[in-house]
Image (cartoon, grey):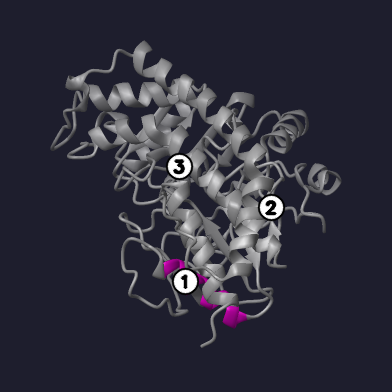
Amino acid sequence: MVLSWKENLPTELKEKVDKVDKIIEPRLEEIDEQVFYNQQRVLDLFRKHRVGEEDLVPSTGYGYDDVGRDKLEAMYADYFKTNDALVRPQFSSATHAIAVGLFSMLRPGDTLYYLTGMPYDTIQEVIGLAGNKPGNMKEWGIDFKHTDLLDNGEVDYDQARKDLQDPKIKVVTIQRSLGYAVRASFTMEKIKKMLKFIKEVRPDVKIFVDNCYGEFSETEEPTFYGADMMAGSLFKNAGAGIVKAGAFLVGKKDLIEGAGSRLNVPGAGKGEGATWGYLRDMYQGFFMAPHTTGEALKSMIYTAALCEEMGMKVAPKWNDPRTDIVQTVTFGEPDPMVKFCAAIQHYSPMNSFVDPIPYHQDGYEDDVVMASGSFTEGSTIELSSDGPLRAPYRLYIQGGLSYAHDKIAITHAVEETFYKKD
């Protein structure tokens, strides 16, 4: 006889879980097919580039002639259908990679423009819209403009067409995931439309895509359709929970060369940058990324379905198209939001004994509550949840190395929030 993990759940909750399992089964099968497709593409690249044990030997010091690093970057460029890539542990975060990419393309007097509304909190600090930290774009004389999204969360193309007439705009950015906004993340179908629009209105500008949380979430990527440069994190989707640090940029060769000079120094550029003990993890993470992202997608589908069954407002809904590993659940008031977040922490493999307390975090304007019992600090391909303590009190849940873990954790989070008395 197989013992059930649901044995000690309240009867009503067990019935809801059983109902959800049946409802979402066809959707999970669709995700499995997507994983097979993306995994085949990655496997083909390992075969094409003849990856061997010698490619896993890391470099030290300057990192000159790092064969494994160069081959991995060639594979990233191949997967994302670009000319070149910069895949480095020296990037401290995706925000760092985004800043390097944008600064490398912008000069004093230029204007950075966001088509997808106001960027998320940490990028606002980079631009100089929030905080006043040294070295931000405002200090360097780089201006910023954006077009507000429509009330339905879609791009306001009529207003954007007018705003893009500014000749000082040199870089147009698309933010794929929602950040802490109330809009939905943008699917590839919508991003393709944005890319086509920008190229028609301003064929002279460079198009940058913040692709965080989006890699391997669909079978296509923004660079397939003309994005000039794109950034992502190695301790999100592309690292599969294996890579301990780093981020990547992919794009046109001259732009990646410029980003290499910005990350390192002009002259050395991409040629420097040791991989120390990271190279094996970066290869294995890339290989595992389609599978692990699929586990996270299935986990978020389950989260949406169960929370919806509990009467909560969720976005996206369980049967909506998925373009990233983020799920939002709206609580309407702070107490249940904090309680749910705490329960996720309690059912994490690391620091399960900790109670999350809302606090001020660098790069964010409001107090933030965060649960992250992950093996790598800040790894959001591992199950985590966070959100600013501001109306409408929405929790942003993301990731999951295994569907089994997420399912257990989310179910118990529902139990602790709605079935247990303090």
Seen at 67% across and 76% down, the residue is 391
Segment colored magenta = 334-345
Q: Is residue 355 above or below residue 404?
A: below
Instruction: Report which quarter residue 375 is drawn in.
Output: bottom left
Q: Residue furthest right?
A: 158
What's the residue type where badge 2 is placed?
Answer: Pro
Closer to us: mark 3 or mark 2?
2
* Circle 1 residue: 343
Instruction: Report which quarter residue 11 is drawn in.
Output: bottom right
Lower sequence index among marks 3 and 1:
3
**Mark 1 crowdedness (10 Å alpha carbons): few <14, some 14-19, many ≥20:** many
Lower sequence index among marks 3 and 2:
3
List x then y, in percent, for residue 233.
42, 44
* Circle 3 residue: 237
Q: Is residue 150 left or right of residue 144?
A: right
Q: Is residue 134 above or below residue 392?
A: above
Q: Residue furthest bottom?
A: 422
Seen at 52% across and 30% down, the residue is 35
